[in-house]
Amino acid sequence: MLTTERLILRQWRDDDLDAWAALNADPEVREFFPAVLTREQSAASLTFFRDELATRGWGWWAVEEGATGRLIGMAGLDPVDEGLPFHGVEAGWRLAREAWGKGYATEAGRAVLGYGFESLRLSEILAVTAAGNVRSQAVMRRLGMTHDPAEDFDDPTVPVGPLRRSVLYRKLSEGPAKIKA
């Protein structure tokens, strides 16, 4: 579990499913993904995230608003999928629309990066999003991540179309020499 001033990043619970399914069924939240998710797909992802956290000790955490106990999304770290033109560990976040504009993504992102650099001793953490997702890219910049347009790529896991073009952001550890993932 990770905590910030306003958030708790924690293991997933069965009672998270309603909020998680609603978030994934929202076309605005899923604007830069190929499709919204069904309740069954959301349930499967929740189970997968929970199993990964239990097995590995890190991954995609549920993000809870500390003041209310309400699930507002997810954030975490995951090894980059096979078949992409780079490798390493990726940071990411997805929040319910009502949680947007409050600085929660940046706050969760800072906690995730801190965990990756301090606990996992990573030398670098990556972040990827669709080229049109300017909100997520703004979070990446606020986190001190950098973008080289020469590293932009067409994501082979996304169907051909406007969402396929993706951007890659990087952040190097600022501490002593670390292990490269």
Image: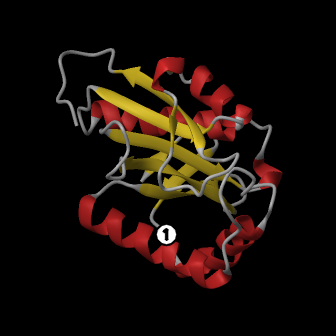
Residue at x 34% of width, y 50% of height: 83
Q: Amino acid at mark 1?
A: Trp
Q: What residue is at 61 percent from the left and 53 percent from the top?
A: 160
* Image x and y of residue 12, in percent: 49, 69
Q: Residues within 10 Å of mark 1 (few under 14, many from 20)?
A: many
Quadrant of the image containing the N terminus: bottom left
Compared across the picture, whether 168 is left or right of 121 comes to: right
In the image, farthest residue toward the front: 160
* Vertical arrangement, residue 131 with respect to residue 158, above or below: above
Q: Position of residue 28 (x, y in %)?
A: 81, 55
Image height of 53 relative to 80, above or below = below
Identify the secondary structure beneath mark 1: loop
Q: Which residue is mark 1?
A: 12
Q: Is residue 147 visible?
A: no
Determine whether 22 is above or below 138 in the image.
below
The answer to which of 69 and 53 lies nearer the viewer is 53
Q: In percent of the image, x 49 and y 56: which residue is there?
A: 157
In percent of width and height, residue 60 lies at 45, 56
Apparent side of residue 57 relative to residue 14 in the rendered image (left or right): left
Q: Is residue 176 left or right of residue 41?
A: left
